[in-house]
Amino acid sequence: MATPPAEARPAYGYFLELQSRWMDNDLYGHVNNVTYYSYFDTVVNYFLIEKGGLDIHNAPVIGVVVESQCNYAQPVAYPDMIHCGLRIGRMGNSSVRYEVGIFRNDEETASAAGHFVHVFVDRATNKPVPIPDTIKDAFMTIMKADSA
């Protein structure tokens, strides 16, 4: 299988810096693959709360993950700083594809890049509903250039 081209920092419209943790490393001395999904989840939810106004405890509409994927280009290890880049690859009526780049320290190309898809649902019924306007407006600020 061909490796996708490396992603560069300018391709992302939003960044969240995280400190890698000692426990992120696995037996091989680098961040374990499943931990990258935690980084993805952290940057997306922080963006939803900070920029989209999502009340994670009381909002009647929430996003549920229905798809995820990650490509790994080079290892990250504790005590590296993690810079999570976020953009919106596609947005529909009730779903969105987040694209995330994981950058090690000050490197310009991503150590890992991937995506996950949220479908927005009514919290009580778990049925798909339109993306709330405040969240949709926030998404438009980081929409991938060739997706708008």
Image (spheres, helix red, strand yellow):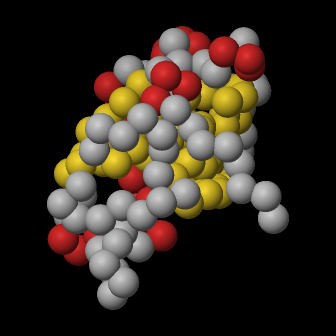
Q: Quadrant of residue 128?
A: top right
- In the visual, does 75 lie left or right of 89? left
Name the residue furthest bottom.
27
Asked if residue 1 can be seen in this view, the reply is yes
Q: Nearer the viewer, residue 80 or 94?
A: 80
- In the visual, does 50 lie left or right of 125? left
Q: Residue at x 33, y 87 (%)?
A: 27
Identify whether 98 is placed above or below 134: below
**Percent position (x, y) of residue 22?**
18, 71
The C terminus lies in quadrant: top right
**Percent position (x, y) of residue 91?**
71, 26
- In the visual, does 41 lie left or right of 57? right
Q: Residue at x 81, y 64 (%)?
A: 1
Identify whether 33 is placed above or below 104: below
**Percent position (x, y) of residue 30?**
34, 72
Q: Residue at x 44, y 46 (%)?
A: 102
- In the visual, does 67 lie left or right of 107? right
**Percent position (x, y) of residue 84?**
39, 40
Name the residue furthest right.
1
Identify whether 50 is placed above or below 82: above
Q: Nearer the viewer, residue 58 or 34?
A: 34
Asked if residue 63 can be seen in this view, the reply is no
Identify whether 21 is placed above or below 113: below
Q: Residue at x 47, y 52 (%)?
A: 111
